[in-house]
Amino acid sequence: MVVGIALTAGGFAGAQTVATIMVAKLLEPNQKTAEVSTEELGRILADGSAIVFDARPHLEWAISHIPGANNAAPKPGVPMSQYVSDVNEILRVVNGDKTRPIVLYCNGPFCGKSKRLGEELLAAGFTNVRRYQLGAPTWRALVGYMEIELDGALYVYRNDKTAVFVDARSSEEFKAGSIPGAKNIPLTEVKAAKDDGRLPMEDHNTRIIVFGKDSAQARAVAEAIAREAFHNVTYFVGTFSTLRSVIK
């Protein structure tokens, strides 16, 4: 497969005049749906000008997804190797409006899920469907953090014993009780945590899940950790009390 990377002028802030990786697109030939760049997707998520769908299975979405992305149930009767979301479920989410702008993504350049779903949406009469074909891996590399849902956090806690759970609350709150095995890293201590063993300095691909008193606190710490070159960081989109109710 031969693909091209297209770079156009721009940047996240919209004021740059030089090409950056943030505006790259894959530009595969003979595609039925257009692409958006990382920069464009960032604007779309910020202004709500389109609904963003993660075209992967629910658990994969729940474990790690682009912040603000929706997920749809699978199309019945399709083998996992040809997984595609259910068009009827997406129709329900958009309240039957087939003109509603939609952006799809999945697992990056070699993933076919968003392409298959895009083609099925066009066949069903949707008129404004685009793809972020660079997908979840590129977003994680360029933006730095993802979201994790409650069922995703529970799955990781039970099944990935290498994962690091980070409690972003104050040391006083942490001492009063947290989830078993969590590391306490408030926002002001992220850099110090690189030297005292709280962050996995010899494996920056370690899965790191940040939670806090609320999702805003968790997101701030997750972003700070990602800026220290950890590239598998998610933050929990709920409260500490909600997480603790299922992880004890």
Image (spheres, rainbow, N blue to C red):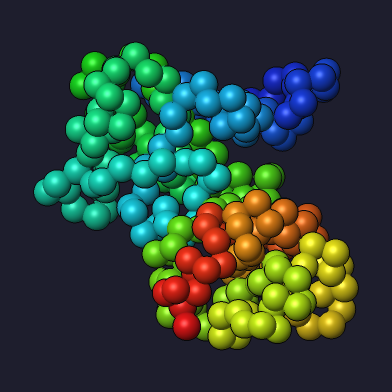
| Residue 10 at least partly seen | yes
Query: Residue shown at 51%/33% (left/top)?
Result: 132
6 left or right of 148?
right
Q: Nearer the viewer, residue 76 or 46?
A: 46
Query: Residue shown at 27%/24% (left/top)?
Result: 95
Furthest toward the left, the residue is 77
Image quarter of residue 5? top right
| Residue 29, image x, y percentages | 45, 24
120 left or right of 3?
left
| Residue 3, image x, y percentages | 53, 33
| Residue 150, image x, y percentages | 44, 63
Image quarter of residue 207? bottom right
Count all numbered tags in the image, as a single digit: 0
| Residue 109 at least partly seen | no
Q: Nearer the viewer, residue 169 or 197?
A: 169
| Residue 204, image x, y percentages | 70, 69
Query: Residue shown at 56%/80% (left/top)?
Result: 179
Query: Residue shown at 66%/71% (left/top)?
Result: 167
Q: Nearer the viewer, residue 240 or 153?
A: 240
153 left or right of 186?
left
